[in-house]
């Protein structure tokens, strides 16, 4: 007897915001999968979905699995939401359906899909990650500046956590998702000797560019990315 085929979970990075930055592979895999999954209860409010549907209009007609993934640091709440979402994905995958799980930016950089994929891999589901353009590369291109050059080091820091020690590292520091802590981040940067640039909502509606720390407002949005270079 032939063993029943389980579906494959494709963790697909849709890029930072501009639909034209989606890869050809991402577009093809979204079209080919029977089910699309998004990390939000409402497609209209899901940034990853709104990016992808512009490049893949067929997404509007595809079976859609909306997963409740709250943005919180509460470990218990996160664990419960990941378990529930993984269970809902597993139901589809055990029916033999391939699922495209959309994630903003790249599927390997602070992506929720990493946690869901890990849970499903533990129960025998095949996981394939599809790369997307990461936000810090898109932001550097938008600013028309090199991200790193010569022997410079590159450090990626989640700005909503403690970054004091990270700012002491040599080379270029990328501060991701700084919106909620922007006031504190600005205070820390003002104390050092840095060249600071920032892109808010890179490639999305409402995109704004700031080229000095003084220009940066304290009420910028969640998708605010800073590139910090030692002077």
Image: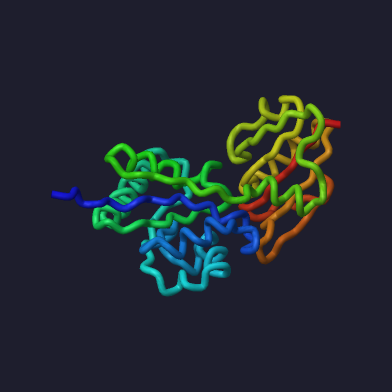
The structure residue drawn at horizontal position 69% and vertical position 39%, both measured from the top left corner, is: 174
Q: Where is residue 9 in the image (x, y as percent from the top left)?
A: 38, 50
Which colour style is shown? rainbow
Residue 160 figure quarter: top right
Q: Nearer the viewer, residue 23 or 173?
A: 23
How many marks do you count on the picture? 0
| 133 versus 163 height, above or below | below
Q: Position of residue 172 (x, y in %)?
A: 75, 33
**In the figure, is residue 200 to the left or right of 150?**
left
The structure residue drawn at horizontal position 46% and vertical position 67%, both measured from the top left corner, is: 43
The structure residue drawn at horizontal position 81% and vertical position 30%, both measured from the top left corner, is: 150
| 229 versus 3 height, above or below | above
Image quadrant where one finds the C terminus: top right
Q: Where is residue 28 in the image (x, y as percent from the top left)?
A: 50, 61
Q: Position of residue 102 (x, y in %)?
A: 47, 56
Residue 214 seen in this snapshot: no
**In the figure, is residue 220 to the left or right of 151?**
left
Pick out the residue farthest to the front: 1
Pick out the residue farthest to the right: 231
Pick out the residue farthest to the left: 1
Residue 11 seen in this snapshot: yes
The structure residue drawn at horizontal position 79% and vertical position 27%, both measured from the top left corner, is: 151
């Amino acid at each position: 007897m032939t063993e029943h085929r389980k579906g494959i979970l494709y963790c697909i990075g849709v890029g930072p915001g501009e639909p034209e930055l989606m890869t050809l592979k991402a577009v093809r895999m979204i079209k080919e999968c029977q089910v699309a999954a998004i990390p939000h209860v409402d497609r209209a409010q899901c940034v990853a979905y709104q990016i992808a549907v512009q490049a893949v209009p067929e997404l509007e007609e595809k079976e859609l699995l909306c997963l409740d993934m709250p943005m919180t640091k509460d470990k218990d709440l996160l664990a419960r939401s990941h378990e529930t979402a993984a269970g809902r994905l597993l139901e589809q995958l055990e029916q033999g359906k391939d699922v495209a799980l959309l994630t903003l930016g790249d599927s390997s950089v602070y992506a929720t899909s990493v946690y869901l994929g890990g849970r499903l891999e533990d129960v025998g589901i095949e996981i394939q990650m599809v790369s997307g353009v990461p936000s810090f590369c898109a932001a550097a291109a938008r600013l028309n500046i090199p991200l790193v050059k010569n022997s410079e080091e590159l450090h990626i820091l989640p700005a909503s956590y403690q970054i004091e020690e990270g700012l002491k590292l040599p080379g270029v520091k990328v501060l991701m998702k700084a919106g909620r802590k922007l006031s504190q981040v600005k205070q820390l940067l003002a104390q050092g000797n840095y060249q600071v640039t920032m892109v808010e909502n890179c490639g999305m509606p409402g995109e704004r560019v700031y080229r000095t720390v003084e220009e940066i407002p304290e009420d910028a949005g969640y998708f605010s990315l800073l590139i910090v270079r030692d002077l």
